[in-house]
Image (tube, grey):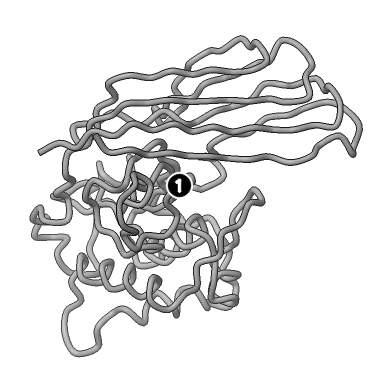
Amino acid sequence: MPVRYEIVHTTVYNYRQPVRFGEHRVMFRPRDSHDLRVLATDLDVSPEADVRMIQDPLSNSVALVQPLVPAETLQIVCSFTIEHAHSMNLELPLSSSAEVLPFAYTLEERYDLEHYLRPYHDDPDGGLTAWARQFIRTDGPTGTRDLLITMNQHIRENFSYAARDEEGTQSPLETLKLGSGSCRDFALLMMEAARRLGVATRFVSGYLYDSALDGGELGGTVGAGYTHAWLQAYLPGAGWVPFDPTNNLLGGTQLIRVGVARDPSQAAPISGSWYGESGDYLGMTVTVTVKRS
């Protein structure tokens, strides 16, 4: 049965004195598909602002927000009601040609998947490639789905989660060296590792539901109450299959998809500019509530 969620995402920027604002790019609206349906949306900005809704090259919904007057505080509140059906991608049969690694996408698939197959981060000494290849079996064929499940679980069990407020994402090699990272770092690590094994992957930003957000017991997930990130791998026969290495999740209704991209830099929840003195910026607060109804 579909699950209904109510999401409120509030971002507040504070400044020492009134500053002027440039255009802000906001990617908060959940992404409609057969498994996720948006029932209602609302966007409130203070101070008053012009708002334009567009679709980016990947058909993500993006709000372009231009505040009209200087202010000491910029507040953007996005509210959504969605209906989420259980994602069964992991249980769908793969095309026979893709059941075992290595496999080859069809020529038509490669045209569409080119940007998701190409690694975007350097691996000069082959460290990331060697890390990825450790999941290839030496005692027989390596199942494509099994390898990705094992890699997803390995990151959850062997890396330490470290929330980070700063913008940007660690490189995969940094994450391997540190043995820790944020959800964005873990998603990027697995994406780039899978690409080096010939599997197309893309970055997903969104939200994560945990019953503790709704007055229930803690569900054991990491990253709930904030924006969250995971990845999808394209497996012929099953399509885009979700993997959340931060929590070792494989689909379900807890992952609420907002945007997809070939690289995390393309899916920042909010970005923009302001004009004032260098010491005017006092900081930002983000609050996300996700309630199940």
Q: Would you call the spot at circle 1 few (<14 residues within 10 Å), some (14-19), or many (20 or more)?
A: some
What x and y, as percent, mark residue 93? Answer: 8, 55
Q: Which residue is mark 1?
A: 225
The single residue placed furthest to the bottom in the displayed view is 139
What x and y, as percent, mark residue 180? Answer: 54, 71
Q: Relative to residue 214, is residue 43 depicted above or below?
A: above
Q: Residue at x 61, y 57 (%)?
A: 164
Q: Relative to residue 176, is residue 41 depicted above or below?
A: above
Relative horizontal placement of residue 284, taking residue 111 as reference (left or right) = right
Q: Splitting the image into 4 quarters, where does residue 268 fall?
A: top right
Q: Quadrant of the N terminus?
A: top left
Q: Residue at x 38, y 19 (%)?
A: 41
Secondary element at image label 1: loop
Q: Residue at x 48, y 16 (%)?
A: 53
Q: Amino acid at mark 1?
A: Gly
Relative horizontal placement of residue 279, taking residue 95 as reference (left or right) = right
Q: Residue at x 42, y 48 (%)?
A: 203
Q: Nearer the viewer, residue 216 or 272?
A: 216
Q: Splitting the image into 4 quarters, where does residue 214 fall?
A: top left
Q: Nearer the viewer, residue 266 or 179?
A: 179
Relative horizontal placement of residue 241, taking residue 73 as reference (left or right) = left
Q: Quadrant of the C terminus?
A: top left
What x and y, as percent, mark residue 279? Answer: 89, 39
What x and y, as percent, mark residue 60? Answer: 41, 29
